[in-house]
Image (spheres, coloured by chain):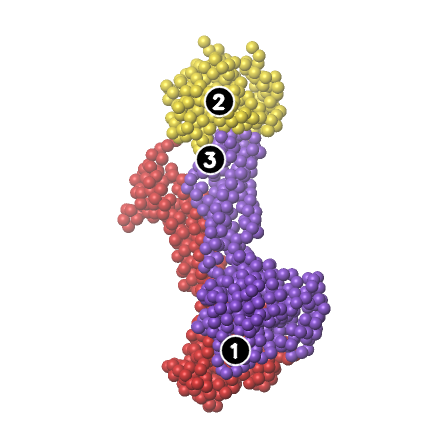
C-alpha cells in the first residue's frame, strides 16, 4: 500500500457521492471544453492571418464599393509588396437559398497574396489563370456541392445581373484548393473579376476590398495612413487596417461572444466550486475520528494536510480530465455538424492547458479549507467526541 | 529494571469557559520497562487524560514526562508525532480501524511512517496478523469482521512497527466477556513473551486482573496501588 | 384529513424545520439550481428578445418586393421603371395621393458600438414619401422627421442606444457627404429601431446609386390581395421579381439566429442541470444520512415509510423551487430588458432587448422541479427503507 492507495480509498469510500461529485466536475469541464473550442474557432481564423496583411475598405462600410482604379494606386505605394482585390458576388446555385461564398478576384495577384492559405496544384493554377471563365473551389465546397474538375457550373448572383438581364454566369471548375491547415475553412470559391465586370449591368469597374501584403509588418501603420490620406476627400474614402483587426471587428459584430462564454463557464465553475467544496468539507467532517487516529499513530499534521489536498486535487483532475476527454469527442462530433457555422471548431492545446490550470485551482480551492481543518484537528477533542 | 516512564509533578489544567479545571496537579509516577499497568478509576478521574499524556497526544500544563530518560513533554507537535510513530502502539475501545481499508492495509498503515521497503512491510504485516491469528482475514474490510476480530486487527496495527509501549484505552469496553478475555490474554502474551510495556485504562476489574500492577486514580490522585498476584 | 396525510404533513414540517441545521449543504443545492435556471433563462430571454424584435417587425398587410433570388433587402436592385410598374400593380392600396408604396434603399454604414468601440454594420434606409405612412406605429420621440430632399437623418432609438455618435443634432460624415441627425424615432421595439432613415433621393445621389432602388414596400388593399400581387410581380416579363409579406420576410430573418441561441441555451442548461442534480443528490443523500436516526425513530413510533419518503422528497422539491425562484429573479433583475445587438439576417446589426416572459419562467421552473424531483426521489426511497433498528443502535 502506498499513500496514493490510502488517498484513493478515501476518495471512493462513498461510491455514490464520489460518482456524483465527479460527474458535476465532469460536466463543468465538458462545458468549458466545448465552449473553449467555440471561442478558439472564432479566433483561430484571425490568429492564423499573416501579420503583414492589410485590408483597404470603403470608409463608410466594407460592403460599400471601391473603384477598381484604386488598386494600382495602392500598388504604387512604397512598402506594398503585392496587392489584389476581391468582391462579394452573392452567389447561389439552383436555389436562392443554396448560398455560396464566392469572390470575384484578380487571379494572379490574389493567389500571390494568399499563396499560403489557398493551396492549389500548380497545373490547376495554370489552368485557372488561363481560363477567363474558370473558377477554383475549396475542397469542402466542392465536396458539399458535388463539383469535380472540369464541371461547368451555372452560378447565379443574388446581387448582379448581366447586361442582357440574366443572372447566371457559367463557370468551369479549374481547380480545387486546400487550406493552410487540415481544419481551415475551404467552403468558398474564387473566379475572374474580368469575367464578371465585362458582363454585369451594374457596379462596373468597382470592387469590394483591396488586400495586400507589406514588406514589413513594422511599416503597416505608416502605409495604412498613407493610403487613407491618398483617398481622403474623394467620393470613396478608405479605411485601411490589418486583416487581423478587420476580421476581429467582424466577429465582434456577432456580439460579445467571449463575454457570454466567460459568463457561462464562470457560472458552471462557481456551481461546482460550491458542490465540490461542500462535499469535501462534509467528507472530512465525517472522517474526524479517523484523522485523529492517524495523527495518534504518528502521521504528522502536514502530511494529513497534504493527503486531504491530494484527495481534492485528484478528484478535480479526474473529473476534469474525463470532462475534457468528453469535450474532445463532442467537439470532434460538432466539428462535422457545425462545419458551416464554425469551420475551425477544435479543442486546441491552449484550451486544454487552461483546463488543467483550472483543475489544479479547483482542487486547491476545494481542498484547502478541509485540509486546513484536518491539519488543525486536535486529537484529544476529536477522539473525545467519540 | 530501568524506568521506561517517569512522571514528575505533572499537572494538567484546561479552560472551560471562564473556569479553569484542574484534572491533576503534582502527579508523579514511574513505569518500569516490561510492566503491565492497569489504570482504573471512575469517570472524570483523569485516567484518559493520563493516557493521552503518556501517549504524547496531549501535553502537560506543568511537570516533566520522561520516556527512556528523555523528556517528551517539551517536544514539538511534529517531534511528538515522530516519537509516537517510533515508540507507541495504540489500542482503542472502538478499534478505530480505517473503514475503507482491508485488515492487512490497516495493519500496514503505521509502516507508511517508516522507510521500510514494500517487501519488508509485507513481512511485518503478515507476522503481526499471524500473531493475532487473523492471517486468513487479511483481505477483509473492518465491517466484515466481528468486534473481537477488529480489535485483534487493531492490536496487530499497534505492534506492527514493534514499539516498546502499548497504550490501551478500554480495549475490551465494547466486547463480551469471552472475547474480552481473548484480547486480554493476547495483551498478556505481548507483555510476557514480547516484552511490551503496556498501560491500559479500564473500568472493568476483570480486565485489570491481567495487569501486573493496578493504579486507582481518583480526582487526579493515585488512591492506592495493588500488585497483581 | 386522513391519518397518512396527517403523518406526511407532520414529517414534511419536521424536515423543513430542521433545514437550517443543514444550512451550508442545503444552500449549495439552492444556489446550484439558481445558477442553472439563470443560465437557461438568460439564453431563452435572449432568443425570445431577438425573435420578438425581428419577427414582430413585419406587418401582414405590407408586401416587400425584391429582385428574384435576393433573399435579403441588401442584395436587391430595382430600376426606376420597375418601381413605377409596381405602384400600378394589382392589390396595392390607394390613398388620397395614389397607390401607397415606398421605394427604398438599404445601404450599410459603419456605426461604433458603445460597448467595445468596434465598427459594426448599421443599415441606412432611404425611404420614399409613403415610407412612414406605410409603417404602423412610427413615432418621433425626439426632434422631428427628416425633410424630403435634404441630408437629414432620423435615428432609431435602438441604434441610438447601442451606437455612439448619433445623438440629436450631431453631424455624421459618410464619405464626402455630411448628414445631420434631426430626430429619433421609435417603432414598437421593431427591427426598424436599429436603423437610420433618410430620404431615398438623397441616399441615391450621395451613395452614387443613380436612379436605382433596392426594394419596394407596398401597402396591400386587403389581406388576400397579396396572392394577386405576388403572381403579378412574378409573371410580368418586365418585373420577374419576388414578393413576400413583410411579416414572412422578417419571420424568416429571425429564425436562424433565435434558433441558434435556443440550441445553445437548452443543451447548456441541461448539461448544467445534470451538474446541479449531482449536487442535489449529494445534498439529499447526506440529509437522509444525517437524519437516519430521526427517520428510524419516526418509523419506530409508527410513522409509515410513505411519510418519510414524502418528507425527504418535499425537502428536495422545496430547495429546488426556492433555487428556481431565485434564478428567475436573478434573470429578471440582471437580464430582463438588457440591450444587446448582433448581426441579423440582413448583415446588419439588430438591436434587441432580453425578454423574460412568464412562459419562459415556467420552462425554468420545470427544469428546477425536474432537478428537485430527480434529486429527491432516490434519497427519499432510501429514507423510506431506513431500518427501524437504526433508532436503537448506539
Seen in the picture, residue C310 relative to A241 is either above or below; the reply is above
Q: Position of residue C213 (x, y in %)?
A: 53, 82
Observer-side mark, 1 or 3, equals: 1
Splitting the image into 4 quarters, where does residue A76 fall? bottom right
Q: Chain of mark 3?
A: A
The furthest residue to the top: B229
Disc marking residue A160: 1
Dot 1 falls on which chain? A
Residue linked to disc 2: B123
Q: Determine crowd level at label 3: few under 14, some 14-19, many 20+ residues with C-alpha closer than 10 A.
A: some
Say which of C167 and B111 sits in front: B111
Q: Mark 1 and mark 2, same subunit?
A: no
- In front of the other: C377 or C230: C230
Q: Nearer the viewer, residue A352 or C189?
A: A352
Q: Chain of mark 2?
A: B
Residue at the (33%, 36%) spot, across then down: C388
Q: Which chain is yellow?
A: B
- The chain letter of the purple chain reads A
Residue C107: where, in percent of width, then height? 56, 76
- Secondary structure state at the residue bearing disc 2: helix
**Which residue lies under the disc numbered 3?**
A9
Q: Are marks 1 and 3 on the same chain?
A: yes
- Which of disc 3 and disc 1 is earlier in sequence? 3
Dot in front, 2 or 3: 2
For image coordinates 70% across by 69% down, the residue present is A225
Q: Secondary structure at mark 1?
A: loop
A142 to C71, vertically: above or below: above
Does residue C124 appear anywhere in the picture? no
Real-space Cα distance between discs 1 and 2? 89 Å
| Chain with red colouring | C
* Coordinates of residue B203 in the picture (x, y in percent): 44, 20
Residue C285 visible at all: yes
Amino acid at each position: 500500500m502506498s499513500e496514493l492507495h490510502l488517498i484513493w480509498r478515501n476518495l471512493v469510500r462513498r461510491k455514490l457521492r464520489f460518482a456524483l461529485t465527479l460527474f458535476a466536475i465532469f460536466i463543468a469541464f465538458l462545458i468549458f471544453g466545448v465552449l473553449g473550442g467555440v471561442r478558439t474557432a472564432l479566433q483561430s481564423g484571425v490568429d492564423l492571418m499573416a501579420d503583414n496583411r492589410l485590408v483597404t475598405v470603403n470608409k463608410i462600410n466594407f460592403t460599400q464599393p471601391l473603384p477598381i482604379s484604386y488598386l494600382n494606386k495602392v500598388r504604387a505605394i512604397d512598402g506594398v509588396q503585392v496587392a489584389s482585390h476581391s468582391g462579394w458576388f452573392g452567389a447561389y446555385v439552383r436555389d436562392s437559398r443554396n448560398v455560396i461564398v464566392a469572390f470575384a478576384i484578380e487571379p494572379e495577384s490574389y493567389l500571390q497574396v494568399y499563396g499560403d492559405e489557398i493551396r492549389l496544384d500548380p497545373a490547376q493554377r495554370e489552368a485557372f489563370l488561363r481560363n477567363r471563365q474558370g473558377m477554383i473551389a475549396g475542397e469542402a465546397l466542392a465536396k458539399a456541392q458535388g463539383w469535380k474538375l472540369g464541371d461547368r457550373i451555372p452560378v447565379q448572383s443574388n446581387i448582379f445581373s448581366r447586361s442582357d438581364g440574366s443572372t447566371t454566369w457559367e463557370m468551369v471548375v479549374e481547380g480545387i484548393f486546400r487550406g493552410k491547415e487540415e481544419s481551415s475553412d475551404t467552403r468558398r470559391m474564387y473566379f475572374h473579376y474580368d469575367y464578371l465586370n465585362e458582363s454585369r449591368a451594374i457596379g462596373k469597374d468597382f470592387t469590394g476590398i483591396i488586400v495586400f501584403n507589406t514588406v514589413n509588418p513594422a511599416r503597416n501603420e505608416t502605409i495604412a495612413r498613407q493610403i487613407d490620406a491618398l483617398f481622403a476627400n474623394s467620393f470613396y474614402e478608405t479605411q485601411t487596417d490589418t486583416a487581423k483587426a478587420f476580421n476581429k471587428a467582424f466577429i465582434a459584430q456577432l456580439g460579445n461572444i467571449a463575454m457570454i462564454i466567460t459568463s457561462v463557464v464562470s457560472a458552471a465553475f462557481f456551481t461546482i466550486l460550491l458542490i465540490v467544496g461542500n462535499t469535501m468539507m462534509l467528507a472530512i467532517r465525517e472522517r474526524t475520528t479517523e484523522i485523529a487516529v492517524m495523527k495518534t499513530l504518528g502521521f504528522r499534521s502536514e502530511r494529513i494536510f497534504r493527503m486531504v489536498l491530494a484527495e481534492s486535487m485528484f478528484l478535480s483532475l479526474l473529473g476534469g480530465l474525463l470532462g475534457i476527454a468528453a469535450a474532445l469527442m463532442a467537439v470532434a462530433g460538432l466539428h462535422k455538424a457545425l462545419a458551416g457555422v464554425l469551420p475551425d471548431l477544435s479543442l486546441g492545446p491552449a484550451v486544454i492547458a487552461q483546463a488543467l490550470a483550472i483543475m489544479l485551482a479547483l482542487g486547491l480551492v476545494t481542498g484547502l479549507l478541509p485540509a486546513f481543518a484536518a491539519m488543525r484537528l486536535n486529537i484529544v477533542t476529536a477522539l473525545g467526541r467519540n | 529494571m530501568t524506568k521506561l516512564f517517569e512522571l514528575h509533578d505533572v499537572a494538567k489544567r484546561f479552560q472551560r469557559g471562564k473556569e479553569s479545571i484542574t484534572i491533576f496537579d503534582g502527579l508523579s509516577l514511574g513505569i518500569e520497562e516490561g510492566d503491565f499497568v492497569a489504570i482504573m478509576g471512575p469517570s472524570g478521574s483523569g485516567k484518559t487524560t493520563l493516557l493521552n499524556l503518556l501517549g504524547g497526544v496531549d501535553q502537560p500544563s506543568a511537570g516533566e514526562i520522561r520516556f527512556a530518560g528523555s523528556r517528551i513533554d517539551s517536544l514539538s507537535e511534529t517531534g511528538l508525532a515522530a516519537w509516537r510513530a517510533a515508540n507507541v502502539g495504540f489500542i482503542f475501545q472502538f478499534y478505530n480501524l480505517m473503514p475503507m481499508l482491508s485488515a492487512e492495509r490497516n495493519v500496514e498503515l503505521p509502516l507508511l511512517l517508516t522507510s521500510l521497503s514494500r517487501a519488508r512491510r509485507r513481512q511485518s504485516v503478515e507476522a503481526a496478523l499471524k500473531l493475532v491469528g487473523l492471517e486468513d482475514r487479511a483481505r477483509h474490510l473492518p465491517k466484515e469482521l466481528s468486534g473481537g476480530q477488529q480489535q485483534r486487527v487493531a492490536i496487530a496495527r499497534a505492534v506492527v512497527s514493534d514499539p516498546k509501549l502499548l497504550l490501551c484505552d478500554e480495549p475490551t469496553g465494547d466486547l463480551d466477556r469471552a472475547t474480552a478475555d481473548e484480547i486480554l490474554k493476547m495483551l498478556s502474551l505481548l507483555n510476557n513473551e514480547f516484552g511490551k510495556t503496556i498501560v491500559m485504562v479500564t473500568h472493568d476489574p476483570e480486565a485489570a486482573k491481567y495487569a501486573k500492577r493496578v493504579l486507582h486514580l481518583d480526582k487526579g490522585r493515585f488512591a492506592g496501588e495493588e500488585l497483581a498476584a | 384529513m386522513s391519518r397518512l396525510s396527517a403523518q406526511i404533513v407532520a414529517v414534511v414540517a419536521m424536515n423543513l424545520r430542521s433545514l437550517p441545521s443543514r444550512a451550508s449543504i442545503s444552500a449549495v443545492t439552492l444556489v446550484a439550481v439558481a445558477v442553472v435556471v439563470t443560465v437557461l433563462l438568460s439564453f431563452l430571454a435572449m432568443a425570445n428578445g431577438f425573435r420578438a424584435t425581428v419577427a414582430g417587425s413585419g406587418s401582414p398587410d405590407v408586401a416587400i418586393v425584391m429582385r428574384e433570388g435576393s433573399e435579403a433587402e441588401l442584395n436587391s436592385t430595382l430600376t426606376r421603371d420597375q418601381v413605377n410598374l409596381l405602384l400600378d400593380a394589382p392589390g396595392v392600396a390607394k390613398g388620397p395621393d395614389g397607390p401607397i408604396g415606398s421605394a427604398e434603399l438599404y445601404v450599410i454604414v459603419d456605426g461604433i458600438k458603445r460597448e467595445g468601440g468596434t465598427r459594426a454594420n448599421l443599415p441606412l434606409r432611404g425611404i420614399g414619401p409613403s415610407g412612414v405612412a406605410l409603417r404602423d406605429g412610427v413615432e418621433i420621440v425626439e426632434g422631428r422627421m427628416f425633410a424630403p430632399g435634404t441630408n437629414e437623418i432620423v435615428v432609431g432609438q435602438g441604434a441610438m442606444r447601442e451606437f455612439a455618435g448619433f445623438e440629436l443634432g450631431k453631424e455624421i460624415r459618410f464619405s464626402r457627404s455630411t448628414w445631420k441627425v434631426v430626430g429619433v424615432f421609435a417603432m414598437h421595439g421593431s427591427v426598424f429601431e436599429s436603423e437610420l432613415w433618410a430620404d431615398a433621393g438623397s441616399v441615391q445621389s450621395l451613395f452614387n446609386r443613380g436612379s436605382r432602388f433596392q426594394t419596394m414596400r407596398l401597402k396591400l388593399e386587403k389581406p388576400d390581395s397579396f396572392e394577386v400581387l405576388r403572381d403579378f410581380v412574378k409573371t410580368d416579363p418586365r418585373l420577374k421579381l419576388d414578393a413576400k409579406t413583410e411579416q414572412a420576410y422578417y419571420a424568416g430573418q429571425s429564425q436562424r439566429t433565435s434558433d441558434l441561441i435556443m440550441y445553445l441555451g437548452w443543451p447548456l442548461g441541461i448539461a448544467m442541470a445534470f451538474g446541479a442534480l449531482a449536487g442535489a443528490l449529494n445534498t439529499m443523500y447526506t440529509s437522509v444520512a444525517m437524519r437516519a436516526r430521526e427517520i428510524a425513530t419516526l418509523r419506530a413510533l409508527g410513522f409509515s415509510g410513505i411519510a418519510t419518503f414524502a418528507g425527504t422528497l418535499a425537502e428536495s422539491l422545496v430547495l429546488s423551487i426556492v433555487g428556481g425562484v431565485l434564478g428567475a429573479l436573478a434573470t429578471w433583475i440582471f437580464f430582463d430588458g438588457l440591450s444587446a445587438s448582433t448581426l441579423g439576417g440582413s448583415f446588419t446589426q439588430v438591436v434587441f432587448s432580453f425578454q423574460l416572459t412568464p412562459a419562459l419562467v415556467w420552462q425554468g421552473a420545470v427544469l428546477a422541479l425536474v432537478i428537485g424531483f430527480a434529486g429527491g426521489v432516490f434519497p427519499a426511497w432510501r429514507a423510506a427503507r431506513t431500518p427501524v433498528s437504526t433508532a436503537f443502535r448506539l
